[in-house]
Structure formats: C-alpha cells, structure tokens
Amino acid sequence: MKRVLFVLTSHDKLGDTGHRTGFWIEEFAAPYYLLHDAGVEVTLASPLGLQPPIDPKSALPEFQTPATVRFNADTVLQDKLAHTLTLKEIEAADFDAVFYPGGHGPLWDLTNNEASILLLQSFDRQGKPIAAVCHAPAVLLHAKKSDGTPLVAGRHVTGFTNGEEEAVGLTHIVPFLLEDALINEGALYAKGADWGVFTQQDGLLITGQNPASSEAVAKKLLDQLHA
C-alpha cells in the first residue's frame, strides 16, 4: 500500500481583519478521497497537530462540491482530521509522497515553517513526489535543492494568481502575493484562466492553481505513485 502525507495549516487568522482562515475544504477532501478510494493510505499532519482550522468560507453553500458533501457526512474522516500529527513527529522516509492542501492559512505558518521545509527537502532528496494546490505552493518558497538553490528555481509551477487574489479582495491582506513570490524565487510560473482547472508538473513536482484544480493535482500524484 502506498502512503501519502497530507500537511495542513494550523493558522486561523486572516491577517488583522478579525476574520478567520485555515485550509479550504475542497482542496483537502477531493484529493483525500481520490487517493483513499484508490487504496492509498493517507496520514494527516499540521504544525501544531490536532484539529487544523477550516476556512469558514469554504463551508458556504456556494463552495460545496461532491467531495465536500461527502466530507460533511464522513464522521470517520472528521475524527481523523481532529487528531493530526505534528510535523515534528513526521519522517519523509515513512511516506511515498507528500501533498499540501491550500487555503490562505499556509501563507502565514507553512511558508517559513522549519519542520515543513526540512520535510520537503527530504522528499526531494529521496526522489518522491511533492504536490501542492492553490496557496499551498507557498510552502516551496524557502525549500532548497541539494545544491542550495531554491527548490522551485527553473521548474514549472503554478499557484493562486494575482488576479484571483484581487477577485477575493485580499491583495492587501495576505503577507505576499504567491504568483509574484514564486517568480521571485526563479520559478517558471504559468497560469490558466482565473478559477479554471490548471496544473503544472515538472518531474516529481506537481502544483495546481486554485480549488478547482485540486482533484487534477491528486490524479497526477496518483499517476506518479503508480509509475
């Protein structure tokens, strides 16, 4: 059985707005179920462990998908989510791949998280797939290749666009714009239409642009696990 690690944010404050953030349900649920239904064992972790915060907006009726509806009725997965491991308990050697769901939370707590960066570098050194969707490619920004250069430098990636950030009114709230940050680290950033399905794969690095891309990223990850 293949084993995949999911790393979720522990951050719940949307800057100084007084509003809440966290991970986006669709970006967790759709990849989780696609992999789980294919017989993959999924382990959940986060910086602080236990229950990661869910972005309340992702639970609104207009953002429901078949995967979120399934999650809302899945008490087993909900209980599993309430007991995530801490990142410091995790060893890359125990897994075949890693996946990072998005939501705005990762911009604050996973971008600079030392344990996450070390994990990513270990997955890269061990030749294992790394996948991230929407805002989660931010976790790649400070990871390095074995030669000390940025992990994303010269590699084809995508992530939440400047246009999408503007559309949700958070351009001046987020700590940085992901599109700009990836380009600044030397990534070969590409994007599709705002809110459309768009992914990039560069070897074992797989990224998706937005919530609509989450299942497509998981499919590419599953293909790599079976390659």
Image: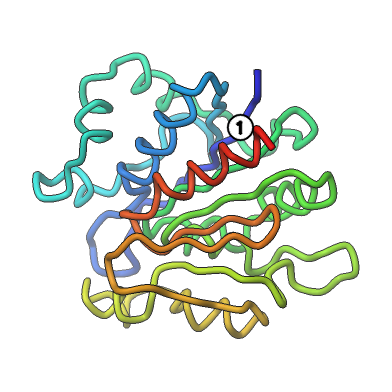
Model colouring? rainbow
Q: Position of residue 86 (x, y in %)?
A: 60, 34
Q: Residue furthest left?
A: 61
In front of the other: 41 or 168:
41
Kindly state the secondary structure of the residue where label 1 is placed. Answer: strand
Task: Check disc 1 and give the amino acid type.
Answer: Val
Provide the residue designation for mark 1: 4
- Determine whether 61 is above or below 106 in the image: above
The local crowd at label 1, few if under 14, some if 14 to 19, many if 20 or more residues have their Cα within 10 Å, is many
Q: Is residue 23 left or right of residue 170?
A: right
Residue at 50% over, 69% down: 158
Q: Residue furthest right?
A: 147
Q: Residue furthest front?
A: 227
Q: Is residue 17 left or right of residue 156?
A: left
- Determine whether 165 is above or below 104 in the image: below
Q: Is residue 85 left or right of residue 219?
A: right
Residue 94 falls in image quadrant: top right
Residue at 64% over, 26% down: 3
Q: Is residue 158 left or right of residue 202?
A: left
Residue 103 falls in image quadrant: bottom left
Q: Position of residue 18 (x, y in %)?
A: 23, 62
Residue at 24% over, 35% down: 68
Q: Quadrant of the C terminus?
A: top right
Residue at 57% over, 43% down: 221
Q: Number of labelled discs?
A: 1
In front of the other: 80 or 199:
199
- Determine whether 45 is above or below 181 in the image: above
Q: Position of residue 215 (x, y in %)?
A: 39, 44
Q: Quadrant of the N terminus?
A: top right
- Determine whether 69 is above or below 192 in the image: above
